[in-house]
Image (cartoon, rainbow, N blue to C red):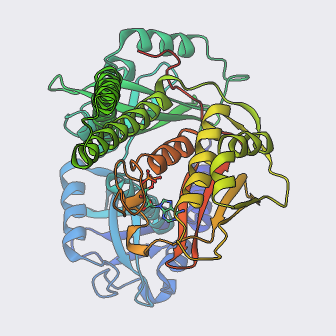
């Protein structure tokens, strides 16, 4: 059914009058406006009666005259055009974008244009804002040093940033459409992750996760990568969810760790070899030293009974015997040092009061002869330790404290033991009123064979404090000294409540 002509004309003129689009009827020849609607007046700001009878160029409605020419040329060529984007100027000077459509028609042999324009300025501005924020986002993504990619839930790459492509040695965007798991060098790991993807349930599955894997670059080289992924809710309700992964190249760190592990292994091996060598040397030297000592004694006895041991020969024998004695002391201490490792016992609760009693008994003779006092006024704690090594540690410290004393008449050597609670352990201090140590030697005295005195002044081997340090370190602790020459020294051993896991060998090699 069609409308009668009069009704149709009436409706058309109603549409003309009420449309919010700008509708103009103008002469093709010079652009003179024959009629414009209210929509035009509102859009352009020009009152209808000030436009009719003037041309668009006179009213300066076109922002760019060339755009009008193009519109007219297209109309001439096609007879009608649709939605050409043009720019116009409102009466107040404001420029806006419009979508312009038009047709040519004849009236009395004169060609006219009917044009309809929609104001799309707001849409264009919104589009620009979206484009601007998209560009900023792209810019941001391209500056992040981590590889970032978006995947569909089947594991195919939808989007990548330049760092992601560069990580694998590809051109930006080259990996889009590829399966992310195909980059994995470890096929077993790839299968494991594929299984997770295949069985993933969007309703109940985890939203974030991560893994580390070896991956292959375009040139075939292998890199170590950490992947942290998270499942994203779809941006629009009809879109499927996606996964965003952030990739961190761990290759330099992994290489450095491997290098470090290799060096530590090498050092541990060569250390163990050295210690074994020291142990064997010390062990095998005991026998010949014993032989020298016993034959010297035998010879001295024979010469004495034959009446041939003159004063000078007797002195030579003393040198020989004291040399052999020192040699055997060094060898014994060296063996004790080696055995810290080979005869180490597992850690167990050790009452340091019992340890001190053992030490007092072992040193009873020295304590008695030097008329010394060994004081411990507060009870000592029970620590997790190797009992025998605790005896060695405390005994070496107390024995040094008794030994490094001035030879002054009326001087009484006094050794004081105290225990102080620390954050997660104990500090055990052994304080003496002895000769003291210069500060510049505070580190050196803990090294093997480092001594500050001649044998004549104070006999010793230089091994005792090295043993103390090693025992403290094996228990996850440390030993320090504070001292003032002429006033005395304090050696403090710090022992943690929980010693580190002990990997020391149990059997002697
Ligand atoms: P040794 O006592 O057999 O020489 P140590 O390793 O036990 O070996 O000690 C190293 C050096 O540290 C000693 O030679 C001595 O000079 C110094 N020393 C150790 N303990 C004390 C102390 N309590 N007072 C002064 N000096 C000390």
Q: Position of residue 292 (x, y in %)?
A: 28, 27
Which residue is depicted at the point 59% across and 68% down? 17
> Is 123 positioned to the left or the right of 114 in the image?
right
Answer with the quarter of the image where residue 427 lies: bottom right
- For image coordinates 22% across by 43% down, the residue present is 313
Left or right of 506? Residue 347 is right
Where is residue 146 drawn, in percent x and y? Answer: 37, 46
In x, y percent, where is residue 65? 22, 76
Residue that sits furthest to the left in the current view: 219
Position of 120 relative to 184 (above/below):
below
The part of the image, by quadrant, that contains residue 354 is top right
Residue 130 visible (yes or no): yes
Q: Position of residue 476 (x, y in %)?
A: 58, 43
Residue 176 against residue 469 in the figure, above or below: above
Q: Is residue 118 left or right of residue 452?
A: right
Q: How many marks?
A: 0
Horizontal side of residue 122 vs 305, given as left or right: right
59 vs 205, nearest the viewer: 205
Pick whichever, 84 or 464, lies toward us. Answer: 464
**Placement of the C terminus among the 4 image quadrants:** top left
What residue do we see at 73% from left, 22% from top? 204
Residue 101 shows in this picture: no
């Amino acid at each position: 059914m069609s409308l009668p002509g009069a009704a149709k004309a009436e409706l058309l003129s109603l549409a003309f009058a009420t449309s919010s689009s700008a509708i103009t009827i103008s002469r093709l020849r010079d652009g003179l406006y024959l009629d414009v609607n209210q929509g035009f007046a509102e859009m352009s700001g020009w009152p209808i009666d000030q436009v009719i009878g003037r041309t668009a160029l006179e009213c300066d409605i076109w922002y760019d005259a060339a755009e009008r020419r193009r519109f007219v040329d297209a109309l001439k060529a096609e007879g009608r055009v649709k939605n050409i984007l043009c720019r116009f100027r409102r009466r107040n000077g404001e420029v806006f974008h419009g979508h312009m459509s038009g047709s040519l028609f004849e009236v009395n042999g004169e060609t006219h244009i009917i044009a309809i324009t929609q104001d799309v300025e707001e849409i264009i501005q919104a589009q620009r804002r979206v484009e601007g924020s998209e560009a900023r986002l792209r810019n941001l993504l391209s500056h992040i040093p981590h590889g970032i990619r978006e995947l569909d839930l089947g594991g195919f790459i939808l989007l990548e940033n330049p760092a992601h492509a560069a990580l694998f040695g590809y051109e930006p965007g080259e990996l889009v459409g590829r399966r992310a798991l195909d980059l994995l060098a470890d096929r077993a790991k790839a299968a494991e992750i594929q299984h997770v993807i295949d069985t993933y349930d969007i309703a109940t599955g985890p939203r974030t996760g991560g893994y580390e894997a070896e991956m292959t670059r375009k040139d075939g080289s292998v890199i170590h990568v950490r992947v942290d992924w998270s499942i994203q809710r779809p941006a629009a309700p009809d879109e499927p969810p996606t996964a965003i992964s952030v990739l961190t190249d761990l290759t330099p760190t992994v290489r450095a760790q491997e290098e470090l592990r290799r060096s530590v292994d090498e050092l541990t091996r060569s250390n163990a070899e050295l210690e074994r060598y020291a142990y064997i040397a010390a062990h095998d030297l005991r026998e010949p030293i014993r032989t020298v000592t016993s034959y010297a004694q035998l010879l001295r006895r024979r010469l004495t009974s034959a009446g041939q041991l003159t004063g000078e020969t007797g002195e030579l024998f003393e040198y020989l015997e004291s040399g052999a004695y020192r040699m055997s002391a060094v060898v014994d201490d060296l063996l004790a040092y080696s055995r810290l490792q080979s005869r180490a016992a597992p850690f167990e609760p050790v009452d340091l009061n019992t340890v001190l009693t053992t030490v007092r008994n072992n040193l009873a003779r020295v304590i008695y002869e030097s008329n010394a006092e060994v004081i411990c006024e507060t009870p000592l704690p029970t620590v997790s330790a190797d009992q025998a090594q605790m005896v060695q540690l405390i005994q070496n410290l107390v024995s040094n404290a008794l030994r490094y004393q001035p030879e002054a008449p009326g001087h009484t050597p006094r050794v004081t033991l105290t225990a102080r609670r620390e954050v997660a352990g104990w500090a055990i201090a052994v304080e003496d009123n002895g000769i003291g140590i210069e500060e510049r030697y505070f580190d050196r005295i803990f090294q093997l064979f480092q001594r500050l005195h001649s044998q004549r002044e104070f006999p010793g081997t230089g091994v005792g404090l090295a043993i103390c340090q090693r025992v403290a370190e094996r228990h996850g602790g440390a030993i320090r000294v504070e001292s003032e020459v002429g006033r005395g020294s304090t050696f403090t051993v710090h022992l943690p409540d929980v010693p580190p896991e002990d990997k020391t060998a149990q059997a002697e090699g």
